[in-house]
Image: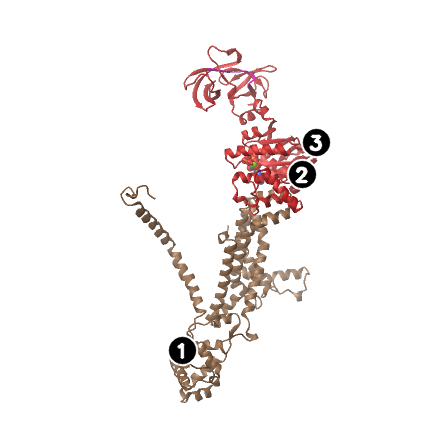
Chain colours: A red, B brown
Amino acid sequence: MNDSAVIDAPQASPQETNSCFARFVDVQKSYDGVELVVKGFNLDIQSGEFVTLLGPSGSGKTTCLMMMAGFETPTHGEILLKGKPISGLPPHKRGIGMVFQNYALFPHMTVAENLAFPLEVRHLSKAEVQQKVDRALAMVRLEGFGSRRPAQLSGGQQQRVALARALVFEPELVLMDEPLGALDKNLREEMQYEIKRIHASLGVTMIYVTHDQTEALTMSDRIAVFNDGVVQQLATPETLYESPDNAFVATFIGENNRLMGEVVERLDERCEVRLDSGERVIAKPVAVGGAGSRTTLSLRPERVALIADDGDAERYDNRFPAIVKEVIYLGDHLRTRLELCGNDEFIIKTPNAEGHPSLRPGQSVTVGWTWQDCRALDA
Amino acid sequence: MSQSPATPLTTADGVPLKVSLRRAVRRSKLKALLLASPLLAFLLIAFVMPIVDMLWRSVDNPEVSTHLSRTVQALQGWDGESLPEEPVFAALVADLREGKEARNLGLLSSRLNYEKSGMRSTISRTARRLRTVEPPYREALIAVNDTWGELDTWKLIQREAVPYTLSYYLAAVDRQFGPDGEIVKVPEYLEIHVELFWRTFWMSAVITALTLLLGYPIAYLLATLPLRHSNLLMILVLLPFWTSLLVRTTTWIAILQSQGVLNDMMVAIGLIADEARWQMIHNKIGTIVAMTHILLPFMILPLYSVMKTIPPSYMRAARSLGGKPLLSFRRVYFPLTIPGIAAGGILVFILAIGYYITPALVGGQSGRFITNYIAYHMQTSLNWGLAAAIASILLAVVVVFYLVFNRLIGVDKVKLG
Ligand SMILES: Nc1ncnc2c1ncn2[C@@H]1O[C@H](COP(=O)(O)OP(=O)(O)OP(=O)(O)O)[C@@H](O)[C@H]1O
Ligand SMILES: [Mg+2]
């Protein structure tokens, strides 16, 4: 069905190939021959990097991981590992460690036997196996748990064993499919730290799948935001948060106010947008066309300021009156819902600092923001 | 335990909590009992009572003590060294006279005939001549039939006067009591049951192994295929359940007999000569083929129910850890299916050793099971005690298998889907 795509698939140049550890080149995948689950997926991963695939459920993250591990074959495109295509390589020859969402610890083996499995199939000597198993158990701080069965461990401990098992045979690449999905919040944070620590100490390359954006932001070197089978943006956590390329990324990462409108005038580095409710806003054009095209304005709640009567109103290019609808007290900051420009889901976050005005529902206020913080994205 | 023991907890209407709880529980227990009672009654009549009756019959031994009561009485204290004295013979004549009157000498004579061949004709001949027999009875009876002059005859009567006997069990394993009460083998030409027991067991084991071999891959497919395909496959697996056992068995006759479909085809393609058609029915092959086919679902379903619970991620994990497909299967998947194998195995084996119709129809002489001899003893030889003893041995084997299985695997693993 994708004849044209097959013909003009970009050929990875040797120079490009050498520079990175793992590559997805224009990978497509369809399970049923009708629908593409992954459409033209491109990703370059440097050696030692921690890359996260982040996206909503059903966006094809697991599918990509399974193709890397060799359990699914790409319908089109190529996956390269250290410059070599691996599509012909069966899973057991790829040498990729994998942590599954439900750990997939073998229930009929003890923890030590689970860890020994990848070493035994590689025909290591008994002494070597023993030594590596011990070292792996120490790495995840589970010394003394070797003779237990997986069912006799807590969720977090099982998670550690799964991690140790994926690392014990010293793979250069480790894939993790929502490894912390089944843990509660505290344990999850602890394990995030643990995984980062191990990543840093071993220097392995990791591809990590999650749909928890906080997890992605705190752990990753780079994040590939997935939607609908394509990478929407591949960037560092900071770039992703501060300058999302499109409306999906802006909404998916962090909290975000959206204002719909139409570009009136576009200059080099700023543009003027007329909102559907009539107001005019100065914004930074990121992913919009010329005058007349539809756009979504994206604005982080913490970048919207309450403007005091006397103060520095001139600092803000955009200033609008608003009515307070709801105030939620969150300790270190206040989350306030406003009605502004006909949108009554407009959220602002204000630090709970000394001298900050206290707001009450029904109160009229003025808010403002700079044009740089207001990004004009695709509609 | 209560906070204030002085005032026990009560419900709103003042009834003590414990009383009202007991009342509520009793009501629901009664309801459960009521719902289950038709089945319980049915099981009692159709299952428990026949088994008890069977076990009883396998040891019950009333014939000699009731129909020769006077003789038995007179024989008390007999040393067994020399022929009994006149009073014993007189008692025998009295017993036989009464038995002839009541027309129940048949039971007695066949019972004694099981133990000593020739006793049936001895008794019937003696009974016919009773009118002419005059005292002294000892000489007269020996004159009628010299069996009465043998020590063994009287030892037999004395031995079988007890109300319970093991002789049916001995017969079931081709043994009998010798003249002095010792256990000896039956003559070689009468040996039949032990061989049949062994044949039943090893053929059942072969059938179990074959169903496992054929069923394992199918169960795996059932558990791993997408639902749409696996449903179709499941229907194919269950199809045999919807066809009569008799139809399926006779179909095998049509296929396997020497003028049957399979032989015809092999002759047609020149694989075998017309005069050298294979004998595949009315022998062991016929029994094994037909029973493997019939019992296959009982292997597939427990296997499937276990395999369904094994997430595909185990095999994937094994592969990603570097296990070659076969090794991953052997070390990871296979061990997890052992409860299913054991469950299917015990189910098929137990069903197989109790199978009757199929071996009877397609087994011929050499492919017959011990069950066919149970039927033979019940319907033809009318030796119900022996039939009961053989059946009890089978029951004991099943119970032993069940207990071992329950000990090793747990009977709750047997699920059909
Ligand atoms: N074996 C399969 N056969 C057919 N369709 C599949 C199969 N596996 C996944 N899909 C479909 O492919 C799409 C992507 O699935 P995938 O498992 O990659 O999503 P995901 O991003 O991992 O989602 P989640 O966050 O829920 O795990 C989904 O629409 C899913 O229904
Ligand atoms: Mg997934």
Q: Nearer the viewer, mark 1 or mark 2?
A: 1
- Residues shaded magenta: A366-373
Placement of A180 over or under B68, stated as above or below: above
Residue name at image x 32 percent, y 49 percent:
B22
Query: So how many labels did they put on this image?
Result: 3
- Do the residues at discs 1 and 2 belong to one chain? no
Label 3 within 8 A of ligand 1 by Cβ: no
Q: Nearer the viewer, mark 3 or mark 2?
A: 3
Q: Mark 3 lies on which chain?
A: A
Contact? badges 1 and 3 (CB < 8 Å) = no
Asked where in the image residue A10 lies, by quadrant, the reply is: top right
Q: In which quarter of the image is ligand 1?
A: top right
Quarter occupied by the C terminus of chain A: top right
Q: Name the residue under label 3.
A: A17
Q: In the structure shown, which secondary structural element does the residue marked by tag 1 occupy?
A: helix
Query: In the rendered structure, which amino acid carries the disc numbered 2?
Result: Ser
Residue A32 visible? The answer is no
How far apart in space, not on screen, are marks 1 and 3 (Cα)?
Answer: 103 Å
Q: Mark 1 points at which residue?
A: B67
Placement of B37 over or under B380, stated as above or below: above
Q: Name the residue under label 2.
A: A87
